[in-house]
Image (tube, rainbow, N blue to C red):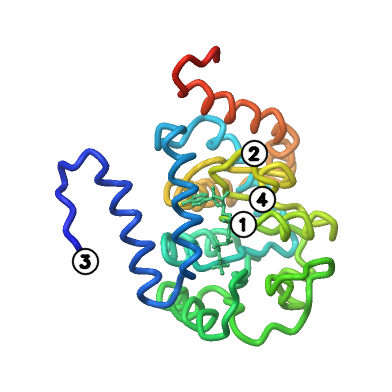
């Protein structure tokens, strides 16, 4: 892999890109994943490539919702597996009832197996990982994303969908689940239809979410509920969007 000089002004962003390229080479990511990542980069640029207060608030609410859930599921696609496999497992370990489900838009059984194997290298049997062998369908979805598990997303009450396409987020909402999204685009259907949207790069958000979950692990249910009820997704999204607009030349914000 091409060496990027440490003093390059875009060092971090270029290193993250390399993780995606490597993910593609290793058969974890879909080629389309690179394009999706590029779209994310543009929004991240407007965020100042930093976790902003709106994201921190959403991360706290997300950790509380996952800890309160009866059947929480962490959905993993090719981009998430390429960028943050270890943090996904760390998050699942911090949420005692959590299950990881590999769920792909550009689904191939080969990629499902590779992603599950990649996650297993970090989990070493400590986390339940649903990979191949889907045995259910999520209603109202035409895409391959509908393929799921009865003890995974089908009967989940809270689902974390990092880096999502809007169709599934909407289908999950119709199925009355609480949806938590990580999406750099505050205007996406995913961002707008989710209950808790973390507008941040998954690379920064996922480790923060795992450590917040660890911190709140022993919090009482009433404290967790209070954190969730104190969070307003629509106004948080508005603030995130205004922050991005403020970066544009000639902005009134
Ligand atoms: O692995 P698969 O087959 O499930 O496919 C995964 C992709 C990502 C290709 C698929 O879900 C897809 O096409 O997604 P979309 O519809 O392009 O949406 C991706 C969203 O994630 C966009 O709103 C991007 O702005 C956002 N995004 C991209 N990179 C990041 C991101 N959000 C957070 N962190 C990122 N690093």
Q: Identify which residue is drawn at 58% across, 24% down.
A: 242
* Residue of label 1: 164
* Residue of label 4: 180
Count of numbered marks: 4
Q: Is residue 11 left or right of residue 236?
A: left
Q: Which of marks 4 and 3 precedes in the sequence? A: 3
State the image coordinates of residue 203 (x, y, percent, origin top left). 43, 51
Q: Quadrant of the C terminus?
A: top right
Mark 3 closeness class: few <14, some 14–19, many ≥20 residues within 10 Å: few
User: 151 or 145, which lies in front?
Assistant: 145
State the image coordinates of residue 76 (x, y, percent, origin top left). 56, 66
Q: Identify which residue is drawn at 61% across, 57% down.
A: 164
Disc 4 element: strand
Q: Quadrant of the N terminus?
A: bottom left
Q: CA distance from mark 2 to mark 4?
A: 15 Å
- Distance from mark 2 CB to nearest ligand 1 atom below 8 Å: no
User: 11 or 205, which lies in front?
Assistant: 11
Q: In which of the image's four quarters is ligand 1 placed?
A: bottom right
* Residue of label 2: 187
Q: CA distance from mark 3 to mark 2?
A: 34 Å
* Residue of label 3: 1
Q: CA distance from mark 1 to mark 2?
A: 13 Å
Q: Is residue 26 left or right of residue 52?
A: left
Label 2 vs label 4, nearer the camera: 2
Q: Which of marks 1 and 4 precedes in the sequence? A: 1
Residue 32 higher or lower than 116, as above or below: above
């Amino acid at each position: 892999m091409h060496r990027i000089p440490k003093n390059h002004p875009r060092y971090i962003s270029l290193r993250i890109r390399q993780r995606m390229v490597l993910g593609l080479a290793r058969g974890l990511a879909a080629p389309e994943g690179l394009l999706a990542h590029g779209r994310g980069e543009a929004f991240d640029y407007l965020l100042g490539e930093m976790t902003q207060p709106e994201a921190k608030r959403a991360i706290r609410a997300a950790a509380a919702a996952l800890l309160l859930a009866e059947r929480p599921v962490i959905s993993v696609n090719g981009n998430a597996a390429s960028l943050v496999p270890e943090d996904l497992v760390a998050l699942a370990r911090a949420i005692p009832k959590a299950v990881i489900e590999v769920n792909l838009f550009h689904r191939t059984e080969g990629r499902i197996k590779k992603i599950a194997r990649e996650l297993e290298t970090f989990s070493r049997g400590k986390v339940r990982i649903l990979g191949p062998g889907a045995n259910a369908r999520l209603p109202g979805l035409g895409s391959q994303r509908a393929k799921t598990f009865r003890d995974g997303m089908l009967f989940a009450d809270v689902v974390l969908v990092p880096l999502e396409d809007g169709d599934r987020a909407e289908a999950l909402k119709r199925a009355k689940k609480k949806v938590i999204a990580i999406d750099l685009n505050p205007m996406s259907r995913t961002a707008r239809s989710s209950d808790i949207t973390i507008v941040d790069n998954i690379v920064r958000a996922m480790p923060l979410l795992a450590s917040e979950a660890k911190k709140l692990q022993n919090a009482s249910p009433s404290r967790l509920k209070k954190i969730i009820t104190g969070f307003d997704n629509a106004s948080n999204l508005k603030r995130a969007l205004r922050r991005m607009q403020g970066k544009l030349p000639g902005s009134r914000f």
